[in-house]
Image (cartoon, rainbow, N blue to C red):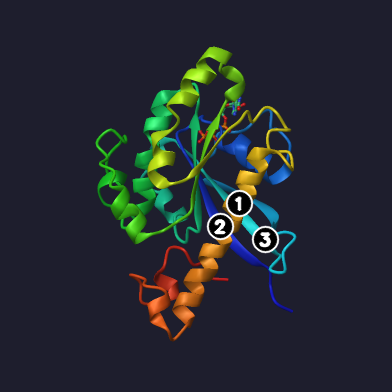
Amino acid sequence: MSSIERVRILVVGDSGVGKTCLTHLIAHNESLTHPGWTVGCSVEVKLHEYKEGTPQQKQCFIELYDVGGSLIHKSSRGVFYNPTNGIILVHDLTNRKSQENLSGWLMEILNKDGKDTLKSTSFDTVDFDTEQFFGSTQIPILVIGTKLDLLDEKRRKRNSQNSTGIAEQCGAEEIWLSCRNSRSLAPGTTDAVKLVRFFDKVIEKKQIIREGFNTSDRRRFVSPYTSPEQSPLICSD
Ligand SMILES: Nc1nc2c(ncn2[C@@H]2O[C@H](COP(=O)(O)OP(=O)(O)OP(=O)(O)O)[C@@H](O)[C@H]2O)c(=O)[nH]1
């Protein structure tokens, strides 16, 4: 019997933006009222139907790695970043700084050998080069803004006019929601469809990369890594 495939998705963003509440909402379709402060990392697993309703449909475990956002643990959290098949960047819609810091989070994940960003105590000095990032990793990204319930109508409109720059830069989809509303990701809603599409993309990308390593026709896939084990996108199943 073949085992169920699994992918690892990192859920990152500043401390207090709502990563634990969001992860719980995605995994259980219910809101979490009293989340604890995440020390290190906590993992939730969701069973996902890949390409549901098509001949390729199959089950897949989505492992959501909720990485504690506190700067105190900045130097040690790199251990959770490999392998990475997908990234959910989380920011608080009422806190602009948390949005600006998303590029720093991306760079921290990219910087696997722990240089530069891991040494600094904040993201202020981080230079973000999207070309470098996407050229070297090709990891699917989703951007999620939380605490939509705390924005009044006026601010919702103003914020939506200049939506998160990082999503645009990454070519990533963006979702704004309230983790306090258990229906925020209810099946059939636009946001739930975006999330399903993102999960499918993460699984597909992992398959493409694995096939690229296994095929003798190297022209189909050019990787900077010489074996699947070296690639940050491949889980060791
Ligand atoms: N009103 C509102 N509050 C939220 C929302 N999401 C999270 N919160 C609250 O924000 C606080 C922080 O939420 P967490 O999920 O613990 O944040 P975190 O990003 O995991 O924080 P760290 O563990 O420090 O990294 C909690 O009091 C949550 O109840 C939301 O959508 N709306």
Amino acid type at circle 3 is: Tyr
Query: What label sits on residue 50 in the rendered view?
Result: 3
Up-down: is 109 above or below 216? above
Q: Residue at x 53, y 13 (%)?
A: 154
Q: Residue at x 34, y 47 (%)?
A: 107
Question: Total marks drawn?
Answer: 3
Side (left or right) of 22 relative to 28: left
Q: Is mark 3 within 8 Å of ligand 1?
A: no
Can you give x and y, in whole percent of width and height, for residue 150 in the image? 58, 18
Can you give x and y, in whole percent of width and height, for residue 124 in the image? 28, 33
Q: Residue at x 72, y 59 (%)?
A: 52
Whether residues under marks 2 and 1 lie with C-beta atoms below 8 angstroms apart, the answer is yes
Is residue 114 shown to the viewer in this render?
Answer: no
Q: Is mark 2 within 8 Å of ligand 1?
A: no
Q: Secondary structure at mark 3?
A: strand
Up-down: is 115 above or below 4? above
Quadrant where ligand 1 appears: top right
Residue position for label 2:
201
Residue position for label 1:
197
Up-down: is 230 above or below 19? below
Q: Quadrant of residue 101?
A: top left
Is residue 177 shown to the viewer in this render?
Answer: yes
Q: Earlier in the sequence, mark 1 or mark 3?
A: 3
Q: Secondary structure at mark 1?
A: helix
- Binning the other alpha carbons within 10 Å of mark 3 as few (below 14), some (14 to 19) or many (20 upward) gives many
Q: Quadrant of the N terminus?
A: bottom right
Whether residues under marks 1 and 3 lie with C-beta atoms below 8 angstroms apart, the answer is no
Amino acid type at circle 1 is: Arg
Distance from label 2 to label 3 (Cα)?
Answer: 9 Å
Distance from label 1 to label 3 (Cα)?
Answer: 9 Å
